[in-house]
Amino acid sequence: MDYAAVIDYLYTCLPMFTRIGKAAYKPDLNNTIALLNILDNPHRHLKYIHVAGTNGKGSVSHLLASVLQEAGYKTGLYTSPHLLDYRERIKINGQVIEKEYIIAFVEKYKDKFDAIEPSFFEWSVALCFQYFYDNKIDIAVIETGLGGRLDSTNVIFPDLSIITNIGLDHTDLLGDTVEKIAVEKAGIMKAGIPAVIGESTDSTKKIFIDKANENKSTIYFADELLAIKNIKYEHAYLQFDIYKEAHFLYHISSPLGGFYQTKNITTLVQSVQVLKQKNYHISDLNLLDGISKVIRNTGLMGRWQVMGDAPLVVCDTAHNVAGMEQIVVQINATPKEHLHIVLGMVSDKNIDGVLAILPTKNTTYYFCKAQIPRALDENLLYDQVQKFNLVGNPFRTVPLAYEAALKNASEKDMIYIGGSTFVVGDLLTYLKL
């Protein structure tokens, strides 16, 4: 098999949540455990940090990996989904897994794995652990795929568990209230292992405290322990100060320009403080350099990514109500004459909830469909937006919608592309970024 054939097998022959949704979800760890048994359980020989959350877990995972790299640790990073290439999911010190390794792994284990009928994600998790083991990494940052308690990654015993925040997403699988979702996310918390919670809320805080008490572990709420002050923002850059109580800790310079990154970086800072208590050797310079070099060190894409200046062009992978609320705040705060939004969504999201908060004044929409089966047809999306007074037209693909927006925009306008990770992925693929 060549790489194209292997990827075709992984995408089309295995149930893949990002393509077909709920039908690919396996609500237990049995398959993952069986796959890892075939591999002689490589995951038992590695050190981990486990990251879950409704929004921000990808950014926090990349930031933490970047900091650990700066501190001299050989760092594995497992995230999902990818934007351009499957290999983005599995990295060591920012370098994606080699095509040759994937081919050899699939050829070696395909028959044994097929007998178990694993999902795409379960297969990827097994590949990830074996790759990290074979390359003798020092530490792996592992992002959950969906939820936490029953996520395939939850076979590990980490040095630290991180939960960024809780919001309503994947409610058909995780529960229809933030309390139910919090219980699922809290499932990554392990006995005796500290946990950092990025955002505390009245509805979820007790759930995390109770879980920590059950586990006899220490819990830290980052937003209660650290404060953000003196925020300065330019389109592609963010600066702010972090204080602990009344004491200045750090001046942060981040190439991740999204306002929401202040919360993610606060979660990161608290997590690093906990790791230092566990004898990780991470200096203040490592922390600050890890933040400022996160894109260079890890290849992170699609987070308030500025792609042009005249007009201003920005894309972002925010795809649920909580994430889009943050985006709309930043769009509204960005100077522009007219706003153009290239918008596509997947069919199993709270589409009305997102549409209800989107801008209407001086805004033109370009409704489109990402090239995956779960994507909502652009004409159906166009029909659905009529009750929200969003003015625009449907386009068959993301590139067609983007080119129409680019043609219509003046130099003082803004173009935003988003609504789905897969819309951003299609755009980046089209632009060959």
Image: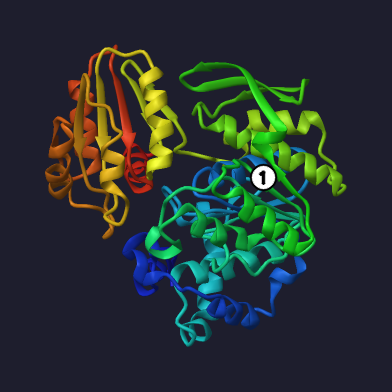
Question: Is residue 317 among what the camera can see?
Answer: no
Place residue 348 in its image quadrant.
bottom left
Helix, strand or loop at disc 1? helix
Quadrant for the C terminus in the image: top left
Which of 41 and 250 lies nearest the eye of the viewer?
250
Q: Is residue 133 above or below residue 416?
A: below
Q: Position of residue 383 (x, y in %)?
A: 12, 45
Q: Position of residue 178 (x, y in %)?
A: 48, 52
Crowdedness near tag 1: few (<14), some (14–19) or many (≥20) residues, C-alpha within 10 Å: many
Residue positioned 75% across, 40% down in the render: 272
Q: Is residue 211 left or right of residue 25?
A: right
Q: Position of residue 179 (x, y in %)?
A: 51, 55
Q: Position of residue 173 (x, y in %)?
A: 41, 65
Quadrant for the N terminus in the image: bottom left
Residue positioned 74% across, 59% down in the render: 213
* Residue carrying label 1: 65
Place residue 270 in its image quadrant.
top right
